[in-house]
Image: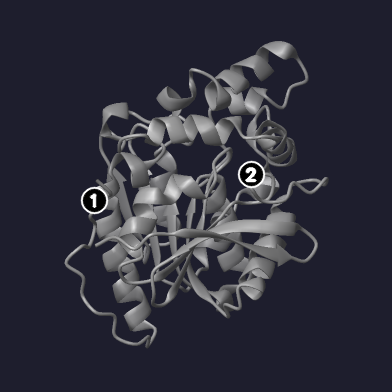
Amino acid sequence: MQTPSSLHFVNVPGVGRIAYAQAGTGLPVLLLHGLGADHAIWRPTVAALSQRFTVYAPDLPGHGQSAHPKRAYTLDFGVAFAAALLDALRLEKAAVIGASMGGMLATALAVRHPQRVQALVLADPAGLGRELARPMRLATVPVIGPLLAFLDMRFGPGLIPSLVHRPERLEPGMAQEIYRMAAAPGVRSAALNVLHQGVSPGGMKPALVQLEGFSGLTCPVLVLWGAEDKIIPVAHAELARKALPAAQVHVFLECGHLPFLEEAEASNRLVSAFLRDALAAEGAAAIPASTNEGRSPA
């Protein structure tokens, strides 16, 4: 039986009202989505992990039903927000899962506040190298052509092909959900805000490449990547493997930028087992086995 999620709101100082989905019982797991998404992108993940954990999936600032503060969306702001969100949720620490931009944020949180991150799962994260898809790099150039290319890739007909290698692998209704998230009020301006802070025509700005900090992480780390990722190259998975040999790295073949959607069952199985073992290794209370491990929503 799947545990339903419900939407809640909490005030985060310096940011405003933040929407978040919560489901399940057990040790806390915080999910951080990518650029142009919201908590709904995690639907299969929440359904699987909530069998063993209490899962929190916020809409990040500028996305979904959360506040849209008028300020620069820098990485420093993102890390301060994530730490303040944990405080607002009364969580001393949590396992953190981040995808794409959320993966960069999750990594930075673990590097800067290691006492707050019990385990780290990264799905095709930004920030381990400079390379990014060309439209995202050119969106920072103040001319209309590159901007239109970016808008098509992130908000237009090019959105699903840029994110998913095999759209037929998505659960029913998820493609429509992805378009809905991208069309939400304020999301385009938030996405461009993020890109102007962190991306140049040459790729990710060097100051935001976190490979050195990643290499010093001491918490358990799992990295997932789609071999056909068109946003952030799968070569960054090998960078992660070399920088942190203790990390578990899994590459899904015939899969794009969203392995937790395109390979939901396999991804959920890997993540659930990883978190169970990682949190048990930290001396956490025993977590009961679940016959629903890795099951995707019908």
Which amino acid does the dot numbered 2 rest on?
A: His
Side of 250 where 179 appears, left or right: right
The type of residue carrying mark 1 is Ala
Residue 114 at x, y = what percent?
57, 74
Coloration mode:
one colour
Q: Nearer the viewer, mark 2 or mark 1?
A: 2
In the rendered image, the residue lying farthest to the top is: 145
User: Going 40% across and 40% down the picture, which residue do you hit?
Assistant: 258
In the picture as drawn, the residue positioned furthest to the left comes out as 291
Residue 40 visible within the image: yes
Q: CA distance from mark 2 to mark 1?
A: 28 Å
Disc 2 designates what residue? 63
The reply, left or right, for residue 194 in relation to residue 32 is right
Q: Residue 195's mark?
A: none
Q: Which mark is residue 266?
A: 1
Q: Looking at this view, is 123 or 66 the one in front?
A: 66
Which residue is at a point 66% across and 75% down the rendered structure image?
87
Location of residue 8 by image quarter: bottom right
Tell me if mark 2 has few (under 14), some (14-19) or many (20+) residues whose alpha carbon lies within 10 angstroms of its own: many
Name the residue: 37% across, 63% down: 247
Instruction: Determine whether the residue tagged by mark 2 lies in a helix, strand or loop.
Output: loop
Where's residue 85, x and y in %?
65, 67
Instruction: Please identify the quarter of the rendering in which residue 91 is found.
Output: bottom right
Residue nearer the viewer, 174 or 228: 174
Considering the image in quadrants, where does the N terminus appear? bottom left
In the structure shown, which secondary structural element does the residue marked by tag 1 occupy? helix
Residue nearest the observer in this picture, 30 or 275: 30
Label located before the other in sequence (2 or 1): 2
- Establish if 138 lies above or below 204: above
Residue at 21% x, 70% y: name it. 290
Q: Is residue 217 above or below residue 231?
A: below
